[in-house]
Image (cartoon, rainbow, N blue to C red):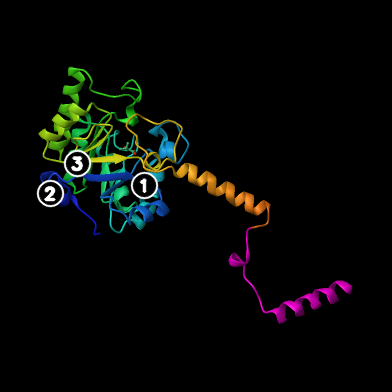
Amino acid sequence: MSKLGIADFYKMKQEKKKISMVTAYDYGMMSLIDQTDIDMVLVGDSAATVMFGLDSTVSVTMDAMINMCAMVSRAASNTYVVGDMPYMSYELGIEKALDNAGRLMKEGFVDAVKLEGGTRIKNTIKALVDVGIPVMGHIGLTPQTASQLGGYKVQGKDFLMATQIIEDAFAVQEAGVFCVGLEAIPAPLAKIITESLNIPTIGIGAGVNCDGQVLILHDLLGMFDRFVPKFVKRYAELGQEIREALNRFTEEVRSSSFPDKEHSYNMDKEVENKLTEYIKNRNGK
Ligand code: KIV
């Protein structure tokens, strides 16, 4: 499958073909994802929880994001790569945002960057788009500022909050994003937004009517148990498989059934006999 681009994502929305997206953080996993039908990957700052063992995304740095983006991009021959702009990499002025987004593109080799926020960061998004950087928006629950939103909980349940999220959606569209992530909002609100925008919406905890869906890879594959939001569906139990495989290995090491002949190198019997003789003589000296 060849790599899709922004024009393809618009077309998919128009033709009502759903877009599939997962997160990726490293070369090994990305090599597998690249051999699948996944349309787009996000090098997410959710690495904070599933890769770095942190409780929030706030501490993720530009350097960490660039390293992960570069690893992922090296394996993504067939998949469009979006890199997350970490907390405080775009809030301190447009020049700093341009500088950091430029680094993600030049050093992380991503195809696009993602910023969290709506109306509040409209001018910043516009400045990035104006210099040719493709931007994905992210509204609703924005984990980098979750403490301001009352924690990791569904957003936009009441009329006022819902209208604010609708205004955020229009703001990022006007600023020029090519698609927008809708996180943890009621499905009817996501449907209204999706039907009102020209750009594709990618939902995570936003119901089935979005133009596409994204999940965190470790959640989808059953490799992360620390907390599991309501919107996570597991498509595999790799955590359990990994534990079982490692325990089988340990058992075979302890019982000397690994490595067997099949997994060992042999040598000519004649050389082996000579070596036995050699060591006998050597030890006898
Ligand atoms: O960082 C991330 O993985 C994200 C997803 C939750 C969309 O932003």
Residue closer to the observer: 220 or 75: 220
Residue closer to the observer: 204 or 258: 258
Q: Where is residue 174 shown, x and y percent of the image?
A: 12, 36
Pointer 3 residue? 179
In the displayed image of the protein, which residue is found farthest to the right?
285
| Distance Cα–Cα, label 2 vs label 3 | 12 Å
Label 1 element class: loop
| Distance Cα–Cα, label 1 vs label 3 | 18 Å
Left or right: 50 as drawn, with respect to 111: right
Mark closest to the chain's N terminus, 1 or 3: 1
Label 3 element class: strand
Question: The N terminus lies in which quarter of the figure?
Answer: bottom left
| Distance Cα–Cα, label 2 vs label 1 | 24 Å
The local crowd at label 2, few if under 14, some if 14 to 19, many if 20 or more residues have their Cα within 10 Å, is: few
In the displayed image of the protein, which residue is found farthest to the bottom?
270
Identify whether 89 is placed above or below 27: above
Residue 24, numbered circle: 1
Q: Where is residue 150 shown, x and y percent of the image?
A: 33, 20
Does the magenta portion include 267?
yes
Residue 110, numbered circle: none
Pointer 2 residue? 11
Q: Residue at x 16, y 51 (%)?
A: 8
Mark closest to the chain's N terminus, 2 or 3: 2
Residue 94: image quadrant is top left
Q: Quadrant of ligand 1?
A: top left
Q: Amino acid at mark 3?
A: Cys
The local crowd at label 1, few if under 14, some if 14 to 19, many if 20 or more residues have their Cα within 10 Å, is: many
Q: Residue at x 21, y 47 (%)?
A: 134
Q: Is mark 1 within 8 Å of ligand 1?
A: no
Does the magenta portion include 88?
no
Magenta stretch, residue numbers = 258-285
Left or right: 187 as drawn, with respect to 72: left
